[in-house]
Structure formats: structure tokens, C-alpha cells
Amino acid sequence: MMQRRPSVFVYLAVGIFLQVLNPVSPSGHSEAKVLILSKNAFFEASRDVLVIRPQDASALNLTASIRRYMHWSQETRVQVHLDGARLHLCEDYPCDVPIENVAAGHHKITVTLCSGAEETCGPVVGESAFIVKHSDVDVDLLEILDGRRQASANSLSHVDTSTSVPLTQIELLEYQDYVARHIISPSEVESVDGCHASSVCGVWHYSTREEGKGKIQCTDLCTDTRYLPDEQVLAQSVAKVQEESAEVYKDMFESQFPQHADPWDVRPSASPMSGFGVTMVYAAHNLAKAFATGGIFTAPNGSMATWTSSKFCGDDRSLSCYFLRVTNVSFRVVDDDNKPAMLAAEREGTWSGVDGIMHDFSTPKYAHKGSFWLQSHALSFIWRFNDRTRQYIESLRSGMNMKHPIIGIHVRRGDSFMAARWMPHFENFLREARAMKELYGVSNIFLATDDVETVEKCHALQDFECFSLPIDRKIYDVGASQAPEHNPAESQYDMWVERRIERGELDGSATALHAIAEIDTLSQCDYFIGRLDSAISRLAYMLMSASKGPRPFVSLDRPWARPPQGIIN
């Protein structure tokens, strides 16, 4: 079981951003911003008091993270103090300063600017006073986090629309985040019973019986396309999964819902010009990256214009049309013409020379879990429905009466054939389902697909009971049923769903809600068969793993990501 260590990460955002945002002090030195974020302690309402819960240690371990901004030179140095005592001289950035055993009482962290020898450090360019005390009651904050997110759906608690942040500055800071991210080494990823990671994605293990002997099998999520453990392995992981999921959710909440925020912390990302599934993969990736580098992921209004509609969403054309808000922070980000702007979604390829995005990073705290684990929990953090989405999905599922245990199968056809992808027929998936039935005794299937003919085949099965959602799949039929299983070349036939939405042939919200309902129902299944080349399959299995831990799966085409950097394109 993961060891819970009480710690509070103090991010000291030190540096000049713009004079209008970070004015020069009378002494001529730039003012530093001092932010305090709680990890395993929690804040009282005053937000100046850190409370240690009874089950945690008697004192806190802090980390002061000093980050160099663009207007500082490479030679800029700062001295970090706690209660007047020198702790560390920062010369390279980011600079993480551990502060151990901070006892109950009044404290102050101070940052001084240095020039010349260390002895000439001064004046003070940033400070933060706070109080540490013990709680008499064991407070479970997780029970109120979703409630606080729900409350913020109607009223942001930290809105500053008067402060404009230039997009060019945010782009430079995000690139700095990219360079400074904690890149996972396969050697950091925890080994399990002799299974060692060969990539950054993560490794799982299971035992199989072979001629009366137990044999350890290893699954690396960047290289393997199946994971079929015995039931005993599955049962052992439940308690640990729940504790780890609760911990990272709380950490992400504290990062995304700070009491204090600076304009340069926001990372306002747009969705890529692609399908709904890819849009959500990028959203999870960008949240994970902001979490790992000290930024705040935001999804401004207009960031999901294709996959929303005024009919369902009103004026909110972002993630919060369907989900609880991902943050309580909102600043106005503008371009050179002072018009609202967002970061482009697909820019890592330009930085890295890689076709796609790289899931090669984490936080030092969670690096041992691998990148798949962090990405899955970032998606799970986003995937909290607001009331109207929940009501829609509950209504759609009301008459299905799905039975457990059940295999979730995703068969992607629709417009997929235009991308020259392999589109295996339902019989290929059914062959794997029958192997799972032999192994686990499962005889129920939930089918998610955009193909009418595949639904008919599933419901005609005699050896399985098939369940599917009552959605109109005929609107997605653009010729896939007549396409060959191995489509030889990418088609110019411009019938992509997103193009049809832009032309007004389909409703963006109706299409997105169909996908959300099927992804969410797949994630509630006990076993999974799909094609991890498809973003819908990836999302479903990520959500399933975040809530239930490693579950048996078979991918008919490829692993979750490509080694060694966890690349997805």
C-alpha cells in the first residue's frame, strides 16, 4: 500500500513577468509571488492556516520550488529562508528546496535577491506568512471536493477578467515547462514481482498456470497488447487502487483549485482539430503536464467549439458544458490584437520533432507509477459529469439493465476507414471475447460502436447476452460497411464527423454525448477488448484503470502508446 507522507509543496513563483502584472518595487527590485499549495495537510477557511490531520506526522515536510522566469538572467540567484534562517542558495532553475520537520506554530518563508557574493543577498523580493496547527478531527476532504467543484460550476471563486495576460508570454512559459518537466526513466517505474519496466508507461504482472507450475507474466503498456491475469491478482489490487486514486485526485484538486493564483500560472489550452476522443486525450495530457510542472490547466470558453452546441451548452463551449469545472481560475488571455486567445493544442511535435504527444513525464512523487497511471487519473479528474450530462446519460442507460461481470467491446468503424486504418470485423473481437469467457466465465457483452450492422450481429449471438445504448448509429454511416477491412490508402472523401458538424449536418453536442455515454459505460465494464489505436478505446480503458486498477484487456492492433517515450499520435 502506498506510503502516505505528510508534505506541503510551496511554490515560490519568483520573477518579473510584466511590469503591469508584477510591478517594480520602490527599491527597484522585482516583487516575487509566494504561493502555498497543500498536499497532505489542508487549509482552513482563512487559507493562512495549514492543518495537519491526526493520522499524519507531528510535523510537516515542505518543498520550496523556485522557478526562473524569462526576464531573469541565467546568473540570477535567490536565497530562501525559513523564519530568518538561511536554507539554500538557488543558482539553477527550477530549484527545489526541501524543508523538513516544520513544527506547529507561526512561520514565514522569505526569498531574497542575491548579487555578487552570497553575503550580499537582499532585499526581500517575496514572503509568505502561515500557521501550522493540528486538527482534533479526522477530516476526509475527498467527500467535499466534488461538492466544491459543483459549486464552482455556477460561480467561479477566483475570476479576474480585468487582467489580460499576453498569449506570447504564456507560450514561452509553457515551453519552459516542457523543457523542465520531470522525464520518467524506466528504472524509476516500480517493479512488481520480478517484472521490470522497459518503457515509461508502466508495468503490470500476473501469474499463469503452466503444467502445474506458476509462471510470472509481465505486461508493459508501451509494448504489450494484452493483459489477462487470474482473478486472484485482480482481487488483491482493489484496496490499493482506491487509496492511490483518492490521493492523486486530492493533489490535483489542490493544484487546480488554489486559493491564490498568478496570471502566468494558467495554461489555457484549446482542443485539437480532430475527433472527440483525441480532444479528450489531449485534455488529459495537458492537465497532467500542468500538474507536473506547477501550472494550472484551463479550458476557456470556445476551446471545444466543434464538440459543443448552443442547444445543449448555451454559451459555454468548453469542457464544462459536460463536466464539472476543472479549475476556479480564470484570467483573460489575449493575442497581439488584445483579442481572447488560447494555446494551440498540437505543438509538442514542433518542440520534440515527434509526430504526436509524448507521455514521458510525471511528478517526482508519482513517477514510480509510470505515465499511463498519471494520464489515466488526469482524465478521471476531468471526467466528473455536471448535472445535465449525468441526467442525459442516466436517461439513455435507464432501459439497458446491464449485467455484471461483463466485457466491454469497442468496434470503431464509421468514418475511420478514411484514415487508411485497419478496421477488423466484429468476428475478430468476438474471438477474443470467447477466449475471455473461457478464462473468466463471463457471458455478457456491452458493445460500443458507430456501426448498425455490428450491433445487429452482437444481439444475435447465442453464447453471449449483448447490451448496447439506444443511439442513432445510422447518422455515422458514411460508407464503412462497403470499405475493405484493410483500407489501402487515406481517402480524400471528406466525411469526417467533425467536418460534418462544421457544415451543419450533425449537432456537435449530440455527437459528443453519444461518445461520452459509450466511453463511460465501457469504463464501468469488468474486461475490455478494443483497438488502442482508437482514442475512444484508449479513453475507456484509462477510465476503467483509474477506478478499478489493472483490468484484463486485449487490443487488436497496438499498445496504449509507443515506446520508449509513451508517444501517441
Image: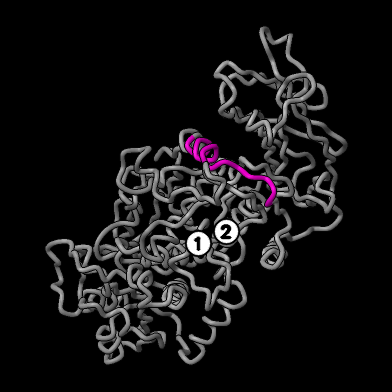
Tags 1 and 2 touching, CB below 8 Å: yes
Residue named by callout 2: 245
Label 2: element kind: helix
**Picture coordinates of residue 10 (x, y %)?**
69, 37
Model colouring: one colour
Quick one: SS at disc 1? helix
511 is higher (above) or lower (below) than 134: below
What is the x, y in percent for residue 502? Answer: 37, 69
- What's drawn in magenta, residue-wise? 161-175
In the rendered image, residue 212, in percent from the top left (x then y), is placed at 29, 64
Question: Disc number at residue 82?
Answer: none
In this rendering, the answer to whether 565 lies above or below 269 is: above
- Taking 133 as reference, is 10 left or right? left
Asked whether 347 or 384 is in front, the reply is 347
Amino acid carrying mark 1 in the image = Ala
Left-right relation of 477 to 49: left
In front of the other: 128 or 431: 128
Residue 546: assigned label: 1
User: Between disc 1 and disc 2, whose residue precedes?
Assistant: 2
Q: Residue 6 sits in which quadrant?
A: top right
